[in-house]
Image (spheres, grey):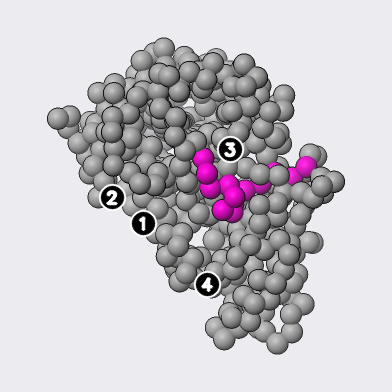
Amino acid sequence: MKPCIIVNQRSYQLPGAPTVIVCIDGCEQDYINQAVQAGVAPFFAGLGKTGTVLSADCVMPSFTNPNNLSIVTGVPPSVHGICGNFFFDPEQGAEVLMNDARYLRAPTILASAADAGMKVAVVTAKDKLRGLLGHQLKGVCFSAEQADQANPVDNGIDDVLRKVGLPLPSVYSAELSEFVFAAAVMLLETLRPDLMYLSTTDYVQHKHAPGTPGANSFYAMIDRYLQKLDHLGAVIGITADHGMNAKTDALGNPNIVFLQDVLDRERGIAPARVLLPITDPYVVHHGALGSYATVYAGAAQDIASIARTLEGIEGVEEVLDRGTAGLRFELPPDRIGDLVVLGERLTVLGTSASRHDLSGLTVPLRSHGGLSEQRVPLLFNRVLRPYNRTALRNFDVFDLALNYAD
């Protein structure tokens, strides 16, 4: 038996070959299918014969931070504590980003593997995830967004732009994700980490539907780098943090329900606060609009009346109280508000119309956050040995790659 580590009550064999786990941000399965059909993704096309092709559910809400942290901890948000990109912190009495590692309640597989003597590297597209993914990690951890600032003390590496051979990319570009893959190839050729985690950005998926030239070009790029990692001998596990859907009507206009405006017009209830956990520093491509919202009631006795009001709105799929949402979606109840509101597949939820800048939406709105973006790919470049799983989650990817990949 290979030596193992126990992380959050799950056992992981330490890698015997370089193992690369990839989170393709916003990767609806159809993106890969369309690229394969177009003949531009031979690596993906071959996984059905040489590897393993599965699908899984991501955690709710189907946003970046909760899912990346579930993937690297192997557990749902009820355990690791990260339940959005943004939340209301009662200690500060303010709405804050969940980028600070002090909000993380569980250790990561990455840090634990490094503590066990493994060489570990993390490359993420946006710097917002670096602090969480690299929490207590003794290894390499940097973002494509701030690759020019990487240094040995903070990131375990320096001179990244020269070593990768690419210029610093724009945060709103396909090149930001390409830098992640190019850096991974560089690291595997030089430092040869035992375990590597890559996390991209969903800028392209917000802008381009599956099968369009922009989407196919992006997945062709990913395919080329995955081939390189495969040729370098890596065991590769691929999943996504969430899917992506159009959020428009038949004419391409955004379908938006402004929940705060609805509640502000409602008479007989105390002022309530609507919070959008999709919010992060990078809102140009989605306008901080997603299909999941939380509501903090002004008074406890108003919760039921608020729920009834929201349930009657066209475009709202479900309204769940704190306890129900916490149990159903495995969320930390102290961080999700009094109500959780889910938008239908073609609908996004906003606060007030005056608070959303939609000037950056130069193409029909595409976004995520709801149940309709929960199904994601789960792919491996190795055949998996038999495993006992009845329902796969994206956060099973480390378990399957380390414990079951031939």
Q: Earlier in the sequence, mark 2 or mark 3?
A: 2
Disc number lying in front (2 or 4):
4
Q: In screen coordinates, is 277 left or right of 71?
A: right
Question: Disc 3 residue type?
Answer: Glu
Disc number lying in front (2 or 3):
3
Q: In screen coordinates, is 268 left or right of 2?
A: right
Q: CA distance from mark 1 to mark 4?
A: 20 Å
Q: Residue at x 36, y 15 (%)?
A: 233
Question: Disc 4 residue type?
Answer: Asp
What is the span of residues highlighted in magenta in the rendered image? 364-376
Evaluate if marks 2 and 3 touch, with contact meaning CB atoms under 8 Å apart: no
Q: Earlier in the sequence, mark 1 or mark 4?
A: 1
- Whether residue 59 is visible, yes or no, is yes
Residue position for label 2: 8
Give the answer, above or below, for where 216 lies relative to 243: above
Mark 3 crowdedness (10 Å alpha carbons): few <14, some 14-19, many ≥20: many
Disc number lying in front (1 or 4):
4
Residue position for label 3: 28
- Residue 235 percent location from the top left of the image: 36, 23
Evaluate if marks 1 and 2 touch, with contact meaning CB atoms under 8 Å apart: yes
